């Protein structure tokens, strides 16, 4: 192999296993980096869904006891991805969600499960497993965040390390007793190591000890250095500001391509945007809504949580439905929110339709058929939903936070006059501000010329990985060039 080598360590990867945007990033970034001369292999747990699709498999490493049982490191390929799969049945041979039990609670051994992933990532980084020795180890979120810690405290010459924050709200904070299972030296149990509020902080350790820190949008990179968004890690992040980089996410514009998408009834492009109307009718039928080209169809494709602002959506919905709007939901999450949307749909079945759960093909139809995609998050590191919406001509309505602020140009008077608007922003994250955004969306929808222009602007925006991949490649090279 030639070119700079990078080991990506991630707990999920699309299309093999996905619970959120982390999987999309882990799945799409390697291909984009290949065009930059960066060779990426990804270490993931060998969940049943991963093992079922792994091809050209060979065993390149074995452990007699890895956090409570034997394990193998498998090398193989799946869905065009070069993978290492950590085959530890006692840790990963479980159905369903990779983090949660069937009752919705965390697996009680998550601390061991993801310490094992990080430990093996560090071992690969040190050249202890197989012929692949990376110059950079890139850890994603708390589940992989101990990899920089293991490498920092290793005695051997080590690769450079990068950690990416996909969502600072998930930190991997465990009791102090966890430390004695990790195999780290005692000197690691300090405020400058893995200690965190009297326990062990996986994400905190990675943020303290990695050579470089990235997060998934420039605005979020600034936000998380403040007490409002820093979630008790803002002080640490301020102290490491020189190593913190906000690199905007992209989407796979081959997978997300309305001109060739097999998941939608009618393919279309910016040049043939009028053909998009057939998908709106198909989505209305799928949701059991009254088909109508003249009623604006608002949609949400999201995890249902307080962070995502879906309680605001519930409160604002009666107002825009009364004005003639329709609403479709694809998602699942907090029970009270699911119940609230189910009740709303039962009361207004002609105007509100919900699909609880997640269906990747249906997500494509939502993007191809909705007039507006709503992302009312209280905080949002980047968000991929609005990027897909732009690509598919579904005008985003977003709160002015994080990556939403970086990717959507508000259709205010100046931006509209300049012909650059791509969506509607609102602030603060309140019912009143969201309701005002819906009023603006109605005005836009009923102005056919303005609506068409905003849609076309969105479809022509570059939401691909090309620009972000160049920035990652430059960061990797700068870190790999430093002596360790």
Image (cartoon, rainbow, N blue to C red):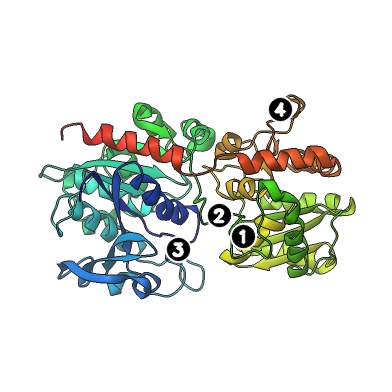
Q: CA distance from mark 3 to mark 1?
A: 14 Å
| Front label number (4 vs 2) | 2
Residue assigned mark 1: 364
Report, in whole angstroms, how far the alpha carbon at label 4 lies from the one at label 2.
Answer: 26 Å
- Helix, strand or loop under label 1: helix
Residue for badge 2 = 256
| Up-down relation of residue 315 to residue 54 (above or below) | above
**Quarter of the picture holding the C terminus:** top left
Q: Would residue 232 be seen by someone viewing this image from the given angle? A: no
Marks 4/2 in contact by CB < 8 Å: the verdict is: no
Q: Is residue 362 left or right of residue 161?
A: right
Q: Quadrant of residue 10?
A: bottom left
Viewed as shown, does residue 148 lie left or right of 401? left
Label 4 neighbourhood size at 10 Å, few (<14), some (14-19), many (20+)?
Answer: few
Label at residue 15 = 3
Q: Is residue 379 visible?
A: yes
On the image, which quarter does residue 206 sit in? Answer: top left
Residue position for label 4: 415
Q: Position of residue 366 (x, y in %)?
A: 67, 59
Q: Residue at x 46, y 67 (%)?
A: 100
Q: Quick check: 293 left or right of 54?
A: right
In the structure shown, which secondary structural element does the residue marked by tag 3 occupy?
loop
State the CA–CA distance, disc 4 to disc 3.
37 Å
Q: Nearer the viewer, residue 84 or 66?
A: 84
How far apart are the alpha carbons under marks 4 and 1? 28 Å
Which residue ends up furthest to the front in the rendered image? 271
* Place of residue 193 in the rendered image (x, y in percent of width and height, measured from the top left): 26, 41
């Amino acid at each position: 192999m030639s070119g700079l080598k990078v080991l990506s360590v991630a707990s999920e990867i699309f299309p093999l296993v996905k619970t959120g945007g982390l999987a999309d990033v882990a799945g799409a970034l390697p291909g984009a980096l290949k065009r930059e001369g960066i060779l990426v292999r990804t270490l993931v747990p060998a969940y049943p869904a991963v093992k079922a699709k792994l091809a050209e498999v060979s065993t390149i490493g074995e452990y007699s006891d890895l956090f409570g049982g034997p394990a193998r490191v498998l090398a193989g390929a799946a869905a065009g991805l070069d993978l290492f799969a950590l085959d530890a049945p006692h840790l990963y041979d479980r159905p369903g969600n990779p983090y949660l039990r069937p009752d919705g609670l965390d697996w009680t051994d998550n601390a061991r499960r993801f310490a094992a992933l990080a430990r093996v990532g560090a071992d690969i980084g040190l050249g202890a497993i197989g012929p692949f020795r990376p110059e950079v180890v890139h850890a994603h979120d708390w589940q992989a965040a101990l990899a920089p810690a293991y490498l920092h405290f290793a005695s051997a010459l080590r690769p450079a390390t990068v950690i990416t924050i996909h969502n600072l709200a998930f930190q991997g904070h465990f009791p102090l007793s966890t430390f004695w299972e990790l195999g780290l030296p005692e000197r690691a149990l300090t405020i400058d190591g893995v200690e965190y509020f009297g326990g062990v902080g996986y994400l905190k350790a990675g943020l303290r000890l990695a050579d470089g820190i990235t997060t998934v949008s420039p605005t979020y990179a600034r936000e998380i250095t403040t007490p409002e968004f820093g979630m008790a890690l803002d002080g640490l992040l301020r102290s490491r500001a020189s190593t913190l980089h906000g690199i905007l996410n992209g989407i796979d514009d081959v997978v997300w391509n309305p001109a060739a998408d097999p998941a939608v009834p009618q393919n279309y492009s910016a040049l043939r945007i009028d053909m998009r109307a057939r998908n709106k009718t198909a989505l209305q039928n799928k949701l059991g809504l009254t088909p109508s080209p003249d009623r604006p169809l608002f949609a949400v494709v999201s995890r249902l949580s307080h962070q995502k602002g879906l309680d605001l959506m519930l409160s604002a919905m009666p107002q825009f439905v009364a004005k003639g709007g329709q609403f479709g939901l694809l998602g699942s999450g907090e029970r009270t929110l699911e119940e609230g949307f189910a009740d709303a749909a039962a009361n207004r079945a002609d105007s509100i339709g919900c699909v609880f759960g997640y269906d990747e093909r249906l997500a494509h139809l939502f993007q191809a058929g909705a007039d507006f995609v709503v992302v009312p998050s209280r905080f949002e590191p980047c968000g991929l939903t609005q990027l897909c919406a732009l690509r598919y001509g579904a005008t985003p309505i977003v709160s002015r936070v994080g990556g939403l602020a970086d990717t959507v140009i508000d259709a205010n008077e100046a931006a509209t006059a300049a012909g650059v608007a791509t969506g509607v922003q609102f602030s603060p994250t309140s019912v009143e501000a969201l309701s005002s955004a819906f009023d603006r969306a109605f005005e836009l929808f009923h102005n056919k010329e303005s609506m068409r222009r905003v849609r076309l602007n969105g479809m022509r925006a570059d939401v691909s990985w090309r620009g972000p991949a160049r920035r990652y490649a430059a960061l990797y090279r700068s870190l790999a060039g430093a002596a360790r």
